[in-house]
Image (cartoon, rainbow, N blue to C red):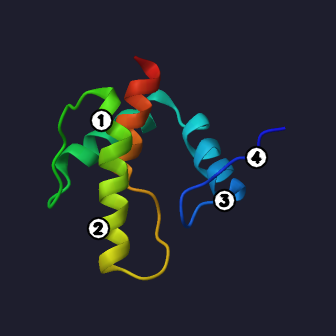
Amino acid sequence: MKRNRFPAGWNEARVRRVLEHYEGQTEDEAVAEDEAAFQSRGQTVMVVPNRLVPEITRLIERRRLGRQSGSEGPNKALQAAARRVRRG
């Protein structure tokens, strides 16, 4: 059986919580979250090729870990982008 590997700060319980959050959202809640991500100051939303998403995510995580200690919630804009990719 293949063992799951999680990024730093993530474990199976955290993945399950994120999945429950998004799988339990109504369409209106998902749209509201997406719209809030687009209006967030200090962040940019852009379209990138799917094949670059893992590399971009790693870069963001490396920079976040370099500036912060401890664990914080997942980036909402990245979650919204991932959800759109799954739907597409």
Q: Earlier in the sequence, mark 4 or mark 1?
A: 4
In the rendered structure, which amino acid carries the disc numbered 1? Leu
Q: Which label is found at residue 3?
A: 4
Q: Earlier in the sequence, mark 1 or mark 2?
A: 1
Q: Earlier in the sequence, mark 2 or mark 3?
A: 3
Q: Is residue 33 above or below residue 60?
A: above
State the CA–CA distance, disc 4 to disc 3: 12 Å
* Label 1 sits on residue: 52
In the rendered structure, which amino acid carries the disc numbered 3? Asn
SS assignment at label 4: loop
Q: Which label is found at residue 11?
A: 3
Q: Using a 10 Å C-alpha cutoff, classify the residue at mark 4 as few (fewer than 14 neighbours), some (14 to 19) or many (20 or more).
A: few
Query: Is residue 55 shown to the viewer in this render?
Result: yes
Q: Earlier in the sequence, mark 2 or mark 4?
A: 4
SS assignment at label 3: loop
Tell whether 49 sits left or right of 23.
Answer: left
Please provide percent x and percent y for residue 34.
32, 39
Q: Is residue 8 above or below residue 58?
A: below
Q: Earlier in the sequence, mark 4 or mark 3?
A: 4
